Amino acid sequence: MSQVCSAAILVYDYFLTLQDEVQYVWRTHWCLGKVLYLASKYLILVVFLVELHWITSRNVSEAECRIFNTILHYSYLLAVIAAESIMTLRVWALWHQRLWVTIMLGCLCVVGIVLGFKDMSTGYHNDVYLTEYAKTSLSYPGCATAGHDRTTSATSYITVLTYETVVFVLMAVDGVHVYSSIPISSMMYTFYEDGLIYYAALLAISIVNTIVGLTQPTEYINLFLPTQVALHSALSSRLFLNLRQSLDGDVGDARRIDIRTFEGVTSRTLTTSAMRFAVGNDGNDDDNTRVV
């Protein structure tokens, strides 16, 4: 049921954002932001198709179950990395690509990715696949697993939670400084508002997943994992599209600001330009556009 609900969330969000996606993604040049957007949004849709096949297939061998499980969890990991990268690069741009922020975020990214792949390679290796589970449960006829190490799942959830907390703190500190010292554009307001909602939703589901993983029977360890991945995908893509939409209205006004009058705003304007993941529809980008 969790997989079906998560897939429904993504499909519903897809149709809601399709028009904006065509305008702000498909009609722009290829760049890092566009690749991350497509990876975070469409990879997970493919994953859910694989998972639905995995949990509903009958008469499958243990080897097939293991292959499905491997594809599923590695795809989850890659989708989450792509979604987190969208938020991380924007926070990095907000801090003007400072060296200490670059080093800190870089180290956190490396540690998180290494732990993620380590958990994928070792945590699921000893799982036992119950291929005859259909005989005892018509509601869950496909591959079922047993013997999964609950510590592995808890470690993964805590790692994601820690990383998101650090990124959110960086965003909040910069936001307080900007709000109290210089005028803030609608684009920047959108970034901070969406970032807060993004973090709050993922924080809640990460806490729930951690509690479930540590306290419930092993068959329920990853009960809300599809929900967490779906939220990563939907919220990060919404953030991307909302920023591009807000930026369309802000960039023209920002370029008319007198640099001698608004010295502080000029610094923020450069950051705003640097946060553009994709060039505009006219194809005219500037040097700062390619920062991320």
Image (cartoon, helix red, strand yellow):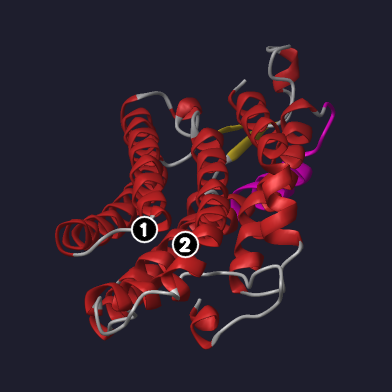
Callout 2–callout 1 Cβ contact below 8 Å? yes
Q: Secondary structure at mark 2?
A: helix
In front of the other: 218 or 223: 223
Q: Which residue is mark 1?
A: 185
Q: Label 1 amino acid? A: Ser
Residue lying at 31% horizontally and 30% vertically, measured from the top left: 211
Residue extending furthest right?
Answer: 59
Q: Which residue is mark 2?
A: 250
Relative horizontal placement of residue 36, taking residue 150 as reference (left or right): right
Relative horizontal placement of residue 53, taking residue 127 as reference (left or right): right
Please provide percent x and percent y for residue 117: 50, 62
> Looking at the magenta stretch, what is its main secondary structure?
helix
User: Does the magenta-highlighted stretch encompass residue 196?
Assistant: no
Which quadrant of the figure has residue 32? bottom right
Magenta span of residues: 58-74
As drawn, 118 above or below 57 = below
